[in-house]
Amino acid sequence: YELDAVNGNETNPGTSDQPWKTIVYAEEHAKNGSTVYLKTGNYGEVHITQQSPRRASWSDALTFTPDEGASPVIEKLFFEADTTASTVDRYLTFDGLTFKYPDKNNADIAVNTDVITSESDSYLKFLNCIVTSTLGVDGEGHYWEQKSIQDAMQFGRPGYGGINNITVDNCVIHDAAQCGIRFKGITSGNIQITNNRIYRDGHAGIKVEGACRNEILIK
């Protein structure tokens, strides 16, 4: 399947000549096991709802990746929690994509804003991605948390179901007011954070909060 943020349309069949427009539509309509190629463009803020399709294994997974030679940008990726389930098995892979929260020209940013937020999801892979933002600064040139995103990537949320089977590998993650990667709530197994470059984060490159029921592999 193909996506084009500029010229795509959801009434199209999702082919190279007649691409879809949005990641949300592709996530809901692409056949299991497919790859979705993103053409150059800004795909804005992506909100994956709790009603999105459930997949049963990695053979069913969808992969989102740039089309050959393309430079797509996603401003924000948010996975909504399913309050009726302990966790949501997504089986989604994001490979080679750029996630960049837009420059707000030093305007205030809502508290707890992250570039990527997963509240209670499992089976997510982020491979070879860039996750970043533009840090706000005060009049003296110091970083200003109120005008910057909180975390580049946040997984889990207190009071919600646990997360497991999360992979972040070979990514470049930078410019967050607090953390590059933060785990909150319950982490219950097979979390792998490997081979990443994380820098220019105000508090910590990687921070683990809440209840960890199994090991998190970080290297």
Image (cartoon, rainbow, N blue to C red):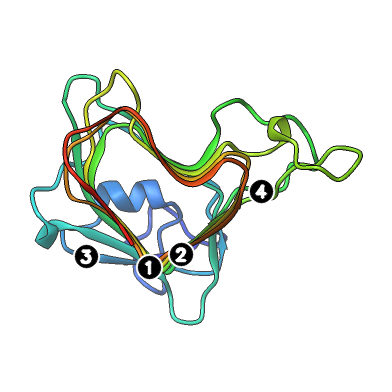
Q: Looking at this view, is 196 or 115 the one in front?
A: 196
Please state which of the two labelled residues, at mark 1 or mark 2, is closer to the viewer: 1
SS type, badge 1: loop
Residue 68: x percent and y percent?
44, 81
Q: Name the residue under label 2.
A: 97
Question: Disc 1 versus disc 2: distance between alpha carbons?
Answer: 16 Å
Using residue 128 as the reference point, say whether residue 62 is left or right of it.
left
Residue type at mark 3 is Ser
Query: Which dot marks residue 34?
Result: 3
Q: Tell me the quarter of the picture where residue 95 sits.
A: bottom left
Q: Where is residue 144 in the image (x, y as percent from the top left)?
A: 75, 36
Reading the image, the residue beneath label 1 is: 195
Q: How far apart are marks 4 and 3 (CA)?
A: 29 Å
Answer whether residue 211 is visible to the viewer in this image: yes
Residue 169 screen position, x and y as percent: 35, 64
Q: In which quarter of the image is residue 61?
A: bottom left
Sequence-wise, the earlier of marks 2 and 4 is 2
What's the residue at 29%, 18% (across, down)?
159
Dot 2 amino acid type: Leu
> SS of the residue at dot 2?
loop
Q: Nearer the viewer, mark 3 or mark 2?
A: 2
Label 1 environment density (alpha carbons within 10 Å; few <14, some 14–19, many ≥20) = some
Marks 3/2: CA distance?
Answer: 17 Å
